[in-house]
Image (cartoon, rainbow, N blue to C red):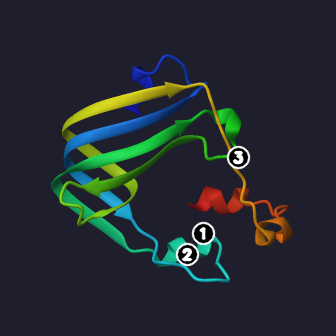
Amino acid sequence: MVMDNAVPTKNIFYAIQIKGRFRDIKLRSVPKQHKPYAPLSAIIKKQPLFYSKNIEGTIVGFRCPPFVEGLNVPGYHFHFISKDTKMGGHVLDFTIEETMLQIDYTPKFFMLLPDSEEFYKADQTINREEELQKI
């Protein structure tokens, strides 16, 4: 990815904002979920995809270093919202037209776990690696 050339190291976290006009963009958005929650790998099979061309808006996201795998997904993760706020979702692909890129470097990672009985009783030993690879 072009942004890899704009960062001094791949070993820290980056918050990224890309604002402007996109030649084309492909998004997904998962419908609202209800308990009991299905695995993400099952949900995305029914996800709607959205495509747009020549659209103004903002992409925001993060780049996580490879060694955080297991706590977070390494690499880039982006979401988009159109300037008129009528279209948005998880970014699958995009082509920039005229944009401004801002990158914030941070060597810090803070994780806050849920403080609830439901979380305390949840089985967190399930390995979701195979599911994540499908997404």
Viewer-nearest of discs 3 and 2: 3
The spot of residue 36 in percent (x, y) is 68, 83
**Number of numbered markers:** 3
Give left or right: position of 60 versus 107.
left
Residue 48, compared with residue 76, is above or below; it is: below
Residue receiving disc 3 = 71
Callout 2 secondary element? helix
Give left or right: position of 129 versus 83.
right
Count neighbours of disc 2 (C-alpha within 10 A) and say few if under 14, some if 14 to 19, many if 20 or more: few
The residue positioned 26% from the left and 45% from the top of the image is 95
Q: What residue type is labelled 2?
A: Ile
Viewer-nearest of discs 1 and 3: 3
Query: Is there a contact, CB below 8 Å, between mark 2 and mark 1?
Result: yes
The residue positioned 38% from the left and 45% from the top of the image is 60
Callout 3 secondary element? loop
| 66, 117: nearer the viewer | 117
Residue receiving disc 2 = 43
The spot of residue 44 in percent (x, y) is 52, 71
- Give the alpha-carbon distance from disc 1 to disc 3, as whole Å: 16 Å
The residue positioned 33% from the left and 54% from the top of the image is 80
